[in-house]
């Protein structure tokens, strides 16, 4: 079995399973738990983010002692069993406890990301991250679509049985991979880089640089995602169209642009250092978000296209920059730090969007997002210095 292909396929399967019910939790809570208040649903979704934020660093620490694939065998087994239990629960407090425990184990699939990167040579990082970015983005969209179709054909709770099936499939793949004695984290990459220059993370102050990058991640993810929670409502308000299919298409435009960007990056013969292009992409993102704030259909569509291109370029290059600053054996721990701040930015953006819309207008998140991304672009070159020598690597 091809190790990299299996790991990327498992990532896609995990993302699809995780996103099957996320858009439909309000309907699920209403049907199973006697229509609880909206604040309870919002609190539950926020709790999921918090659980992942704090659980993944623990899995990353454990991965320094135990092979990541071996960890995934047991965590996915636990997640699958807890998913089956969630299917049978009718008590809201018990559902909170069991389902959040399930999230703790499910979140371990994020170990696949740094593990895949630890098997790659440095010059392949940006391309691999681009592939994973598209897999995650489209996996989320496809998962939500599958969840909607399933909910129309099956009972609401039966989605948990499908999620459990996905967990058990991942467990089976991991068991098969372990039979082939897969390399430890960083084993391939370190072997390929013997004799190369010492990585940036070995330099004094490298840990401080990682935390500076985490701050940039926090600001960027807040600014980029603050426009997401009420976008569908905003589009239907501007266009006066209640067609959910068209709304979904407009919402997913950045994902389509990301696919084009991935294809374009693979056609390029050369690619510079990950630091290059981040600032210009951020400024393009400022324009894309700002344009969407004007209540005009053409302006929104144009802004979505610009924003999608910028979002892909910045997210891929920021992740690549983190891996360039780190060492293969420290990828999981450093990625857990970055993931914590990314998740914190997304969580704050969801809460902030609700406050902005409730106190102002539906277009306000766009102005705030553009201003936040502009601030991120100003701070980025100040906090994360450009390398003295830019190495050009073939893709």
Image (spheres, rainbow, N blue to C red):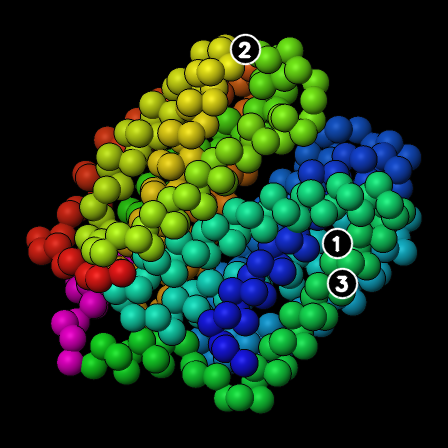
- Give the residues drawn in magenta, as a range: 195-208
The residue identified by callout 1 is 99
Q: Is residue 38 left or right of residue 237?
A: right
Q: Which mark is residue 50?
A: none
Q: Kindly report the distance in space between the C-alpha atoms of the residues bearing marks 3 and 2.
A: 41 Å
Of residues 62 and 108, the one nearer the viewer is 108
The x, y position of residue 204, in whole percent, is 17, 62
Residue shown at 44%/75% (left/top)? 64
The residue identified by callout 2 is 360
Number of marks in picture: 3
Residue shown at 66%/15% (left/top)? 241
Q: Of tags 1 and 3, which is closer to the observer?
A: 3
Q: Residue furthest front?
A: 267
Question: What element does badge 1 sit on?
Answer: helix
Mark 1 and mark 2 lie on one chain; the one further toward the N terminus is 1
* Mark 1 residue crowding within 10 angstroms, few (<14) / some (14–19) / many (20+): some
Of residues 94 and 163, the one nearer the viewer is 163
The x, y position of residue 394, in whole percent, is 22, 62
Of residues 187 and 154, the one nearer the viewer is 154
Question: What element does badge 2 sit on?
Answer: loop
Q: Is residue 272 left or right of residue 16?
A: left
The residue identified by callout 3 is 164
Mark 3 and mark 2 lie on one chain; the one further toward the N terminus is 3
Question: What element does badge 3 sit on?
Answer: helix
Q: Is residue 259 magenta?
A: no
* Mark 2 residue crowding within 10 angstroms, few (<14) / some (14–19) / many (20+): few
Image quarter of residue 153:
top right
């Amino acid at each position: 079995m091809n190790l990299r292909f299996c790991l990327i396929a498992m990532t896609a399967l995990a993302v699809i399973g995780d996103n099957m019910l996320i858009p439909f939790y309000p309907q699920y809570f209403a049907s199973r738990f006697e229509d609880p208040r909206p604040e309870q649903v919002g609190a539950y979704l926020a709790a999921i983010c918090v659980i992942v934020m704090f659980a993944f660093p623990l899995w990353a620490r454990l991965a320094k002692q135990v092979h990541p694939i071996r960890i995934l065998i047991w965590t996915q087994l636990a997640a699958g069993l807890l998913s089956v239990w969630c299917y049978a629960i009718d008590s809201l407090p018990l559902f909170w406890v069991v389902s959040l425990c399930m999230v703790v184990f499910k979140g371990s699939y994020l170990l696949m990301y740094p593990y895949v990167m630890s098997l790659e040579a440095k010059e392949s990082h940006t391309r691999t991250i681009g592939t994973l970015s598209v897999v995650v983005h489209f996996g989320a969209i496809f998962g939500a679509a599958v969840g909607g179709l399933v909910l129309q054909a099956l009972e609401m709770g039966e989605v948990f049985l499908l999620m459990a099936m996905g967990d058990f499939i991942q467990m089976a793949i991991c068991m098969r991979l372990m039979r082939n004695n897969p390399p430890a984290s960083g084993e391939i990459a370190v072997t390929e880089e013997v004799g190369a220059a010492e990585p940036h993370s070995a330099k004094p102050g490298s840990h401080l640089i990682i935390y500076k990058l985490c701050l940039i991640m926090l600001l960027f993810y807040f600014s980029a995602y603050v426009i997401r929670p009420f976008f569908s409502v905003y589009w239907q308000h501007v266009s006066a169209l209640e067609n959910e299919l068209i709304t979904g298409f407009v919402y997913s435009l950045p994902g389509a642009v990301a696919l084009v960007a991935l294809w374009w990056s693979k056609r390029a013969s050369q690619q510079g250092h990950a630091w290059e292009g981040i600032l210009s992409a951020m400024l393009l993102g400022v324009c894309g978000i700002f344009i969407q704030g004007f209540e005009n259909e053409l302006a929104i569509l144009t802004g979505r296209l610009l924003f999608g291109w910028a979002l892909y370029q910045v997210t891929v290059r920021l992740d690549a920059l983190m891996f360039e600053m780190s060492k293969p054996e420290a990828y999981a721990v450093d990625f857990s730090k970055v993931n914590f701040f990314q998740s914190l930015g997304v969580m704050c953006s969801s809460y902030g969007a609700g406050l902005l819309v409730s106190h102002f207008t539906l277009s306000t998140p766009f102005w705030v997002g553009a201003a936040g991304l502009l601030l991120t672009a100003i701070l980025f070159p100040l906090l994360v210095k450009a390398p003295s020598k830019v190495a050009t690597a073939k893709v």
